[in-house]
Image (spheres, coloured by chain):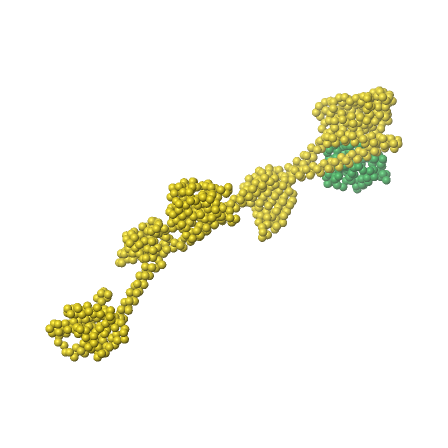
Chain colours: A green, B yellow
């Protein structure tokens, strides 16, 4: 099932350390390579420009600020994005409406589906 | 009678008898002449024996000559004329002729006829009077014409004297030459008191008579010229004078004046006009003083005896009478009776108000009710006073209407009727004024309420033109009434610069004009470029006939409510986020703990400990409403479970500091990992072991840092670095990752030593909260 994700390089931007650790764990279980995790926007933005990953898993809110700038940079490089959020309604700009969103807390299965959708979308 | 006979033409036969003795006419010729005369000719002897009787006499008296010759003349003389006959005979005896006198005779059928008789003596040759002859002329017909003329003259005089109108003649010098009885009766003068005096003496208004005379001197015709005449008793009559001048050959002989007494009509007119004026004043909201003065003047103007009228008004206390209107009474008297208390014997007015009925003092000098005010009234020349109460519809006393005279006088029935009419009109005026005052007060009251409302309230016409606006609405935007009154509401400041809101309002006004209420939230421009959100309502005012008379736009500032709603939404969102995050953390803790737990038992113990550590940090934060937690409290909460009673195996030293929620949670978990490790492998495993925790604040401003050291002593010897587990990851990576800090974890032989450094700059949550507020302000401003 997770086979398609094997070897996928996933950038993780998540300010909550324990959640980041969990994502890292889940992604590894799926055979993904984790880039990061990164807990602050400045580093994340730099990494987004550098590249070196196939997909990004972004927390909507990093250190109290929206992750929009990072998402825009990634979109500019056509990197598929999966958002994850603790908020009820994603307060993301409309242009990211098509990106899958994971609502915390989520199970591995949810994540795999989201990553697959994003990867498929990005490929298309 | 003498005049009339004097004008008679001479009778042709008159000379014949007197000429007879001088001529010697042929007796036959003479007889024929006598017989053919159309006049009755009778002669008699001195003893009265009839000696001749001609044909005309036969015809006049109905007796034949044969019957009458030798009979006494008394046959045809009525008894009441016998004396006259004797007197005539005496004259005849003296040889005098009795020229044509008028007398009465009786005919055969007993009819009395009027005749004119000329009798001449018959003198014989010796010059002796032997008889007389008379020529009779029937004047009955003539006399009846004269009677008629006399009667007609009498009628004319009666008509002239007693006509419904007064008549008089005035000479060019203004002296009354003649006046008819009606005029004399009208004014109460005797003929001699009137005729011979100057006409101006009888006029009440000198300029009026001066004008009348001037016009007449110019031979102008006057038609119904209004004037006031003064009667002998001092009263006034209103008259209409029509007059012209009788002149002969251009010379002013006298005026011919017709005086029509219109006093009754005039008085009725004055009363009606005053009432009309008063009611008009009341209707147009004129001042009460003006209405009362009109009513007071009404009685005075219609009065023919110089009445002085007064209105007093009952004070709100129900006890004192206050000056209302009395322009003709002496000012000092008005002042003296102002504020007089009503009572059972308080003059006419005070008593009338007290008794609620008319009080008539025909003579103040003797009226017991005037005891206390007698001197005052008499001093001002007031002798009688009639007062009626002014009563409201509910019979409450509003005041009094009184009439004064300068002489003792009692009212007629008509006077009392007029007084009651005027008092009723005064009541209407006072009540209207009170209702008006009550309405005004109620309007002021409403105005105060409107102005005190926190809401913006406007009154407009059905098409939305602003008629009224309350203070709140103006103050919101720093406007004056002039900025908005008379303008279409959507063109006012509040709606300026927002075409779509103007259109929305326009539609609402159209709906309201059709009777439909609208309510919606709208952002209105307040001061400058600031806008505020209002709960706006547009309500039509509908009258009893179902027509929309006004619109009431009102708006309540809901900016604060909106802000609160928004903040509440944000807080709920944040709470949700935090719960979800906490659950994500819990999930992570589960997964991480599971990975390093050899058995379900050890998982349960380790997981529950971590969950408890998280919970105790939450508890501390909840106490400060997530403002932060004190470092000392955080350390104690994590270490208290490991303290040994009676021994100090935990030492906490150094400065205390407030930690951000994020730092408190992460550091709490890190301390928990250190403590559990100590409990499993370190200082807390043996009685001698102890942990020293020291804190220190380094640097200042953005560089301010917390340095926290954990050092274990007296525990079992540590054999090198253990395998990296969740605890070490949490301490070494977590603090750095989450808080930008660092941790040096050393497994020294004497025990674990950990040095943690954390930045103490402004936390993320605080930054986040202020970000929300900024966002909110921006929303208000935009």
Q: In the displayed structure, does residue B81 sit left or right of residue B519? A: left
Q: Identify which residue, B546 or B332, lies in the foreground.
A: B332
- Tell me if residue B156 comes above or below residue B688 in the rendering: below
Q: Identify which residue, B537 or B238, lies in the foreground.
A: B238
- Tell me if residue B675 comes above or below residue B243 in the rendering: above
Q: Can residue B453 be seen in the rendering of this structure? A: yes
- Tell me if residue B587 comes above or below residue B268 in the rendering: above
Which residue is rendered at x = 17% and y = 73% of the image? B47
Residue B722, position as x, y percentages in the image: 86, 25
Residue B727, position as x, y percentages in the image: 83, 28
Q: Quadrant of the N terminus of chain A?
A: top right
**Residue that extends furthest to the right in the rendered view of this protein:** B599
Which residue is rendered at x = 77% and y = 27% of the image? B634
Q: In the displayed structure, does residue B702 sit left or right of residue A21? A: left
Count of marks, rendered view: 0
Q: Quadrant of the C terminus of chain A?
A: top right
Q: In the displayed structure, does residue B165 sit left or right of residue A112? A: left
């Amino acid at each position: 099932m997770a086979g398609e994700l094997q070897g996928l390089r996933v950038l993780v931007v998540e300010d909550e350390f324990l959640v980041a650790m969990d994502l890292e764990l889940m992604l590894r279980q799926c055979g993904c390579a984790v880039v990061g995790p990164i807990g602050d926007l400045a580093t994340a933005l730099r990494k987004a420009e550098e590249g070196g990953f196939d997909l990004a898993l972004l927390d909507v809110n990093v250190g109290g600020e929206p992750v929009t700038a990072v998402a825009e940079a990634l979109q500019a490089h056509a990197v598929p994005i999966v958002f994850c959020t603790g908020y009820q309604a994603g307060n993301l700009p409309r242009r990211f409406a098509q990106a899958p969103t994971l609502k915390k807390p989520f199970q591995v299965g949810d994540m795999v589906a989201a990553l697959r959708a994003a990867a498929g979308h990005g490929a298309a | 009678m003498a005049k009339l006979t004097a004008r008679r033409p001479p009778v042709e036969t008159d000379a014949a008898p007197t000429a007879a003795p001088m001529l010697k006419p042929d007796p036959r010729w003479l007889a024929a002449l006598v017989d053919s005369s159309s006049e009755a000719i009778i002669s008699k002897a001195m003893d009265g024996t009839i000696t001749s009787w001609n044909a005309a006499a036969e015809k006049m008296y109905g007796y034949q000559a044969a019957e009458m010759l030798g009979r006494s003349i008394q046959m045809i003389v009525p008894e009441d004329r016998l004396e006259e006959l004797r007197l005539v005979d005496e004259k005849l005896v003296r040889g005098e002729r009795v020229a044509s006198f008028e007398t009465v005779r009786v005919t055969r059928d007993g009819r009395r006829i009027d005749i004119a008789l000329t009798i001449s003596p018959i003198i014989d040759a010796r010059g002796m009077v032997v008889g007389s002859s008379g020529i009779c002329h029937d004047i009955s017909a003539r006399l009846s014409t004269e009677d008629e003329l006399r009667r007609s003259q009498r009628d004319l005089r009666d008509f002239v004297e007693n006509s419904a109108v007064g008549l008089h003649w005035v000479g060019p010098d203004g002296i009354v030459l003649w006046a008819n009885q009606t005029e004399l009766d009208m004014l109460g003068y005797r003929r001699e008191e009137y005729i011979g005096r100057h006409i101006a003496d009888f006029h009440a208004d000198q300029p009026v008579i001066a004008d009348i005379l001037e016009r007449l001197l110019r031979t102008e015709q006057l038609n119904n010229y209004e004037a006031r005449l003064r009667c002998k008793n001092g009263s006034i009559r209103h008259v209409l004078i029509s007059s012209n001048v009788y002149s002969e050959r251009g010379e002013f002989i006298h005026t011919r004046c017709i005086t029509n007494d219109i006093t009754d009509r005039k008085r009725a007119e004055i009363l009606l006009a005053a009432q009309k004026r008063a009611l008009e004043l009341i209707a147009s909201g004129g001042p009460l003083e003006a209405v009362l003065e009109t009513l007071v003047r009404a009685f005075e103007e219609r009065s023919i005896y110089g009445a002085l009228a007064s209105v007093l008004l009952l004070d709100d206390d129900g006890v004192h009478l206050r000056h209302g209107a009395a322009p003709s009474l002496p000012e000092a008297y008005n002042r003296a009776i102002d504020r007089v208390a009503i009572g059972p014997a308080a003059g006419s007015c005070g008593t009338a108000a007290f008794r609620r009925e008319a009080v008539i003092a025909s003579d103040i000098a003797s009226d017991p009710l005037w005891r206390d005010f007698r001197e005052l009234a008499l001093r001002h020349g007031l002798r009688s006073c009639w007062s009626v109460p002014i009563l409201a519809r509910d019979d409450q006393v509003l005041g009094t209407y009184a009439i004064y005279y300068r002489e003792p006088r009692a009212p007629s029935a008509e006077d009392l009727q007029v007084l009651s009419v005027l008092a009723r009109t005064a009541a209407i005026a006072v009540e209207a004024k009170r209702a008006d005052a009550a309405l005004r007060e109620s309007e002021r009251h409403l105005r105060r309420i409107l102005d005190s409302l926190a809401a913006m309230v406007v009154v407009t016409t059905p098409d939305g033109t602003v008629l009224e606006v309350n203070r709140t609405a103006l103050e919101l935007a720093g406007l004056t009434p002039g900025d908005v009154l008379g303008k279409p509401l959507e063109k006012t400041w509040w709606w300026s610069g927002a075409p779509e809101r103007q259109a929305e309002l326009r539609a609402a006004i159209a709906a309201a004009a059709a009777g439909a209420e609208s309510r919606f939230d709208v952002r209105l421009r307040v001061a400058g470029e600031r806008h505020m959100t209002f709960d706006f309502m547009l309500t039509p005012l509908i009258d009893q006939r179902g027509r929309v008379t006004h619109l009431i736009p009102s708006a309540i500032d809901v900016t604060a409510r909106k802000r609160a709603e928004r903040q509440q939404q944000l807080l709920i969102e944040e709470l949700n986020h935090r719960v979800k995050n906490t659950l994500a953390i819990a999930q992570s803790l589960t997964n991480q703990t599971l990975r390093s737990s050899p058995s379900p038992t050890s998982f349960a113990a380790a997981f529950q400990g971590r969950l408890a550590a998280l919970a105790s940090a939450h508890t501390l934060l909840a106490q400060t409403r997530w403002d932060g937690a004190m470092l000392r409290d955080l350390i104690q909460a994590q270490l208290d479970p490991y303290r040994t009673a009676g021994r100090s195996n935990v030492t906490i030293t150094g400065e205390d500091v407030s930690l951000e929620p994020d730092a408190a949670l992460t550091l709490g978990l890190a301390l928990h990992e250190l403590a559990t490790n100590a409990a499993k492998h370190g200082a807390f495993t043996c009685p001698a072991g102890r942990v020293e925790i020291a804190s220190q604040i380094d640097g200042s401003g953005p560089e301010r840092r917390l340095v926290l050291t954990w050092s274990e002593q007296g525990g079992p010897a540590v054999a090198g670095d253990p395998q990296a587990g969740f605890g070490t990851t949490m301490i070494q990576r977590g603090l750095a990752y989450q808080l930008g800090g660092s941790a040096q974890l050393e497994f020294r032989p004497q025990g674990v030593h950990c040095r943690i450094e954390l930045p103490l700059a402004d936390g993320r949550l605080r930054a986040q909260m202020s970000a929300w507020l900024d966002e909110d302000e921006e929303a208000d401003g935009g």
